[in-house]
Amino acid sequence: MSAKIVQEAAASGSEDMPSSYAVAHEHSVVRVTPTESAAGARVLANESPVAVEFDAQPYAVMMLTPADLEDFAVGFALSERIIGRADEIARIDIRYGAIGIGIDVRLEKEHSSRLAERRRSLAGQSGCGICGLTTIGEALPELKPLTGAPAVSEAALFRALAALPARQVINRQTGATHAASFCSPEGEILVVREDVGRHNAFDKVIGHLARQAIDPASGFALLTSRCSYELVQKAVLARIPALATISAPTELAVSMAKDANLTLIALARSDSVLVFNNPFGIMVKPF
């Protein structure tokens, strides 16, 4: 099956990136109906293996959309609790190979000790956030509760919901990627990152906030996915006080949000949302 590169892509791609790692490619297909068939084309999202190393030591292999890799590296390191701040990273080296991408995150020497405590070996899938963990405690770490009310209102949330589809460049081509965004208190979308995996997209946003020194408490996160417990975990670890998702949450996600004082909004649509946890009473009476 033939394929050609789709030129329109995420603006953050590296100039040194081989064309095979474009975020999407066009493939030939045959469309079949009950009465006829016809040749056509379909744009598919790229899903590439990315080997993450810390201080040249293998840590994880993740499947993700090959864009915004520096943001992903920082966000992943924060979510894995290997670093506490972006400035604990000395540099990020990215290598493009024939069958995959390598990211080597070099830590400042005084912060490398945490790596030994957190090191694991896993083969991560785009829909999986816990592959390779060996204990329940690793999968469900105790989270420090949030203490400040989030900066979000009904008007801001619906404004962001209305604006997000136009910012999903890759998904508009492929229909196959999730979007994670961080929004201002007024509902302006400040950053959007897309990926075949919702966890990866959120890590990219978290990494962008850290690299740009944007206060995570100054806005709220909006994602186009269901709300699994890992997204709640990432939001709390990043100290983002409010998380909204387009689809439904799991019971564990809601329970974890309540324990951590995370404002959790889900099934967010243009005409209504469901508030599952509202510890600071930002929209309705606290419950």
Image (cartoon, rainbow, N blue to C red):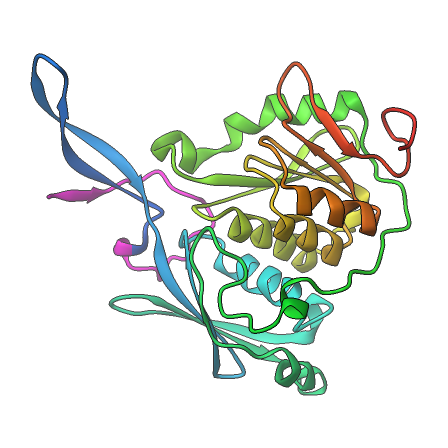
Q: From the image, give the main secondary structure of the stretch colored magenta.
A: loop
Tally the numbered discs. 0
Residue under the image location 27 percent in, 54 percent down: 19
Magenta segment: does it hold 47? Answer: no
Residue under the image location 26 percent in, 66 percent down: 99
Specify the quadrant of the image occupied by residue 114.
bottom right
Q: Position of residue 113 (x, y in %)?
A: 68, 86
Quadrant containing the C terminus is top right
- Could you tell whether 134 is left or right of 65 in the image? right
Residues 157 and 67: in front is 157
Magenta segment: does it hold 7? Answer: yes
Specify the quadrant of the image occupied by residue 251.
top right
Quadrant containing the N terminus is top left
Q: Position of residue 142 (x, y in %)?
A: 77, 64
Magenta stretch bounds: 1-20
Residue under the image location 38 percent in, 42 percent down: 9
Vertical arrangement, residue 285 with respect to residue 208, above or below: above
Q: Position of residue 41 (x, y in %)?
A: 18, 30
Residue under the image location 64 percent in, 49 percent down: 229
Residues 183 and 132: in front is 132
Vertical arrangement, residue 62 with respect to residue 150, above or below: below
Vertical arrangement, residue 210 with respect to residue 219, above or below: below
Q: Position of residue 56 (x, y in %)?
A: 48, 83
